[in-house]
Amino acid sequence: MLFNSLEFLLFLPLVVALYFTLPVKWRWLLLLVASYFFYMSWKAEYAILILFTTLVDYSVAIKIGNELSKRKKKNWLLLSILVNLGMLAGFKYLNFFSESANALLQASNSGYAFPLYQILLPVGISFFIFQSLSYTIDVYRGIRKPEKHFGKFALYVSFFPQLVAGPIERSTSLLPQINNPRAFSEQNLICGLKLMLWGFFKKLVIADRLGMFVGLIYENPAEYNGIPVILATLLFAIQLYCDFSGYTDIARGSARILGYELMINFNRPLIATSLRDFWNRWHISLTTWFRDYLLYSLPYIKDKKIVQAKIYRNLVITFLLMGLWHGAAWTFVLFGLFHGIMLVIETITEKPVAGFYQRMGINKFPVLKKTIGIIYMISLVVFSLFLFRANNLSDSMLLLSNAFDFSNTAEAMKAILKNLEVVFGIMMIVILLWAEHFHAKHNLVRTIASKPMIIRWTAYIGFIFFVLLFGVLHQEKFIYFQF
Amino acid sequence: MTNKTAKRFILFAALLVAVNFVLDQSFKAFSVHNILNRKMDEQFAAYNDTLKYLALGNSHNCINTHILEKSFNYGSPSENYIQSYYKLKHIIEKSGKKPEYVILQADISTYGPKIADRYEYNSYWIDYIDYRELAKVKSDRNILTKWLEGRFFSYAGNYKDVQLSILYRIKMKTLEMHNGYRPHRDYKNFADEPNKRKLAWDKANLFLSKDAYFDPSIKVYFEKILQLCQANDVKVIMVRYPMTREFHEEEIKIVPEEKLFAEIEAITSRYSVFMGMLNYHDIFFDHPEYFFDPDHLNVKGSDLFTMQFAKDMEKMESGMLAE
């Protein structure tokens, strides 16, 4: 069930109405049933996967909680990690590993080949597995006690607003909310609806519109060169942001209506001034997950021997795995590797660059310094997206080489300016950036809310119909569903 | 929720409904495609002559009804076999005007998924299409949103139609139409285009898909059209309309032409009402001046094509046409 589908527009009000009609003690059950129904509307059988993860992590956490021996606690945790990552490997990476191994075997003239399987990737598997896994690790680390109520834990793993594309919630934040559900609040309802509307604007008006142009270029890599390729990749960065953060807004809005507060997943990443800053603002629930559960678990912290080289190594490993988390393809592995290496270079060159800024007097012009930072960040991110968006490695290499062929620039520019979807899309991006900037400085929502009713309602109604008229209503899937 | 808040919510919802109603009605009255399609309906309702030829299809269908006697061109923008079926069903079952021949479009682009998934102008099609049946055939419940769109939200997502309607009102002052035929666009000529190949590539990739050339739902509705004609003893002629050489060359890079038409032949061979396929796709390969763009004839091209088609129909009826 897509957020931008008729089914969801019927499903959500029904769930909300029933939720607040039921006695408080049964509300978790309704949400659990609704969440499984939501997930099963894609492929009913795959609900077994969520149930299995839930059963394993629920039991393991109880065992860890009851166990006194640290070694045994660790064994139980290892079991949870093995089961969860094993499931992820089986459903998401098995064919990737087999194909890669087969390529190596073929190169060495071995007659053997690993079999390939027809496996349909379960929607959102990387999200719910990471969410569930974080819970057992938290219990192991003593950050929280095991949840005794199986149904409520099952709801934590499957909570429908964030089930298929996050934010990846921590048990320390979501489980207490499930245990103490809030009463209906007009404030939550209004805030939730506003968040959802903003998410629909980002998804339908910007992301899906830009997607048409980006798709045309990336599905036909041999046909385009120069400006269209660079522009398509730049627009893809914004498409990806609007698609994913739009989804997150709708997810957070839906949850807010029900009285649940989900974590902020994006903090204006398009104005980040370095790659590190970018990752602090982009898909925050994933980056903090990798930071807390992988990067900090890698050897150097444990040994307390903080050797710079090991920090860099760990950073590269973390980003390589984060790339792989996005998809089972070498393009994603290289995407992660590129970001890891660039972050290391950025860290190493931080002081010399700061000195250079000082010598050149750039520090006296904060706007210029910020602009240089944004251009630097966007250049790196856009460069890496050649890997992220392309269908395969050879396509991304072809597009990269074509990007620097400016042989027909004038003609290409004319064609782009004639493409009303692109022109309109760019106008909408300007509105988005202005709105985000204004919101950060003056709180746009509160500013509108403080206006007289007639202005406020005109703004809301105007915006609703603007999204309806100018939205691309083909029910395009959210990009992050595939991860 | 306090009473005051509840009242505000109700008032806000009522305002939304009212604005929606105004936008919906305005769009229905303003949309150029709606106006064209409704005018065609009116002309068909007023058509009193013997209906020998009924031409269906999309903008490729350029049969000039001034030239082909006793004909009605009921082709409409972006029409696919799904829409053609429901329109034909309506004509045969409800209008009481049964044609002797139905002329079906059979271009390569007629059969692909990109055409099958184009559901535009639902505020017009809602009078014809059984969306529930269509949703079942396509196993896609979201088709039902198209019914909602057609009934209550005709403007939703149709910003392009608004833009076209404004341009139409600026550029074209009159709506010339004869038995459904509207002279084809003529304000530019494909022969003058500096980069014909690129235009052809763009157009071919817009409508054709590398993954599939014969959409399952199009197959279902193609058979439904033939079954409907068979049951009502209406003869079927299929026509491949003229295309530019560049467009055809780009088409066959994407779609396996022989395979596609072999599959079509396997279907048509089962129906005795099928009279044959007339293939004109290459007759103007050396005449780009007859085209408005890579895949649409201009007025002169349409006239020449229709004259040829009329002659061929005469020959066919007299049993002289070999194919």
Image: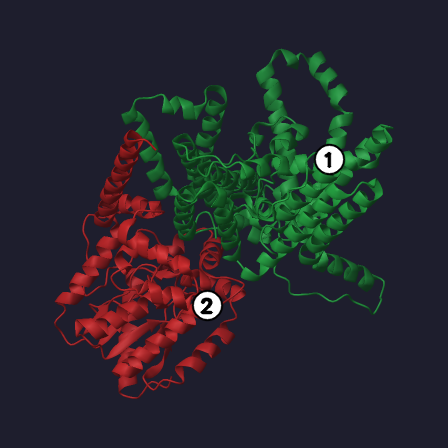
Chain colours: A green, B red
For the residue pair B39 and A208, the one nearer the viewer reads as: A208
Q: 10 Å neighbourhood of mark 2: few (<14), some, or many (≥20)?
A: some
For the residue pair B284 and B277, the one nearer the viewer reads as: B277
Residue A153: horizontal and vertical position, in percent? 60, 45
Establish whether labels 2 and 1 are both on one chain: no
**What is the three-letter code of the residue carrying label 2?**
Asp
Residue at 52% x, 64% y is B254
Residue B82: horizontal and vertical position, in percent? 35, 67
Vertical order, A330 against B314 (above or below): above
Q: Residue A260 carries which label?
A: none
Residue B179: horizontal and vertical position, in percent? 19, 66
Q: In this view, does A80 lie to the left or right of A32?
A: right
Indicate the chain on which mark 1 is placed: A
Residue at 37% x, 66% y is B134
Q: Can residue A415 be seen in this view?
A: no
The residue pinned by badge 2 equals B215
Residue B228: horizontal and vertical position, in percent? 30, 78
Q: Is mark 1 on a helix, strand or loop?
A: loop
Q: Is mark 2 on a helix, strand or loop?
A: loop
Residue at 37% x, 86% y is B322
Between tags 2 and 1, which lies in front? 1
**What is the three-letter code of the residue carrying label 1?**
Gly
